[in-house]
Image (tube, rainbow, N blue to C red):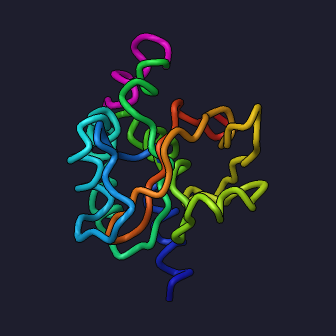
Amino acid sequence: MKILKITTISLLLLGMPALLLAGNYGSKTKTSMDIVDTAVSAKSFNTLVAALKAADLVDVLRGDGPFTVFAPTDAAFAKLPAGTVENLLKPENKAKLQSILTYHVVPGRYMAADVLKMSSAKTVNGKSFMVSMSGGDAMVDNAKIVKTDIMASNGVIHVIDSVILPKDM
């Protein structure tokens, strides 16, 4: 049943970049807030939340999960070339936005200690990103993990400093 749910999500969504969180980055203690509410309350994931809404992914990330989200901050989205975010938010680019966003989500709950044991992680969109260490920093593809283990009722969020893109983008 769990595999069917993940497959259904993958087919419906196709992709999903970094997800949620904000200035205070939440807490490492148990919470009743889901991933979306945690991101909204953080106030530094406004772009991510807007992208989730435009991609119709909010309900998915409010679901049971569990999910591990590698969430880019507003500053991470600002690193993209001018006009990229605005273009992705257009209705005609919904499938591409879903693919990018779901690339930021891994099925299951993986705490930082678990992530550090991986060399790659298969995402909800079906593609895998690389996990590595560079100069003492944990990396997912080209993004540095800057905050870890932000608990949500349906998963965990790790904050990244860049938007990561599937290799075919």
Position of residue 35 relative to residue 82, above or below, is below
The x, y position of residue 58, in whole percent, is 28, 55
Task: Decide which of 109, 31 is in the foreground and name it.
Answer: 31
Residue 17 showing in the rendered view: no
The answer to whether residue 85 is magenta is yes
Is 106 situated left or right of 101 in this image?
Answer: right
**Nearest the camera: 147 or 121?**
147
Horizontally, residue 142 falls left or right of residue 52, namely right
Residue shown at 50% from the left, 89% from the top: 1
Question: In this view, which residue lies farthest toward the top?
Answer: 82
Q: Could you say where residue 37 lies in the image, as x and y percent from the top left?
A: 23, 56
The span shown in magenta is: 80-90
Give the x, y percent position of residue 71: 45, 44
Residue beneath the point at 48% across and 18% down: 79
Q: In the visual, does 68 lie left or right of 142?
A: left
Direction from residue 117 to residue 31 in the image, left or right:
left
In the rendered structure, does residue 163 fall within the stretch colored magenta? no
Question: Is residue 78 placed above or below 136 in the rendered structure?
Answer: above
Residue at the spot 43% in from the left edge and 10% down from the top edge: 82
Q: Position of residue 98 (x, y in %)?
A: 44, 46
Residue at the extreme bottom of the image, as rendered = 1
For the C terminus, the image quarter is top right
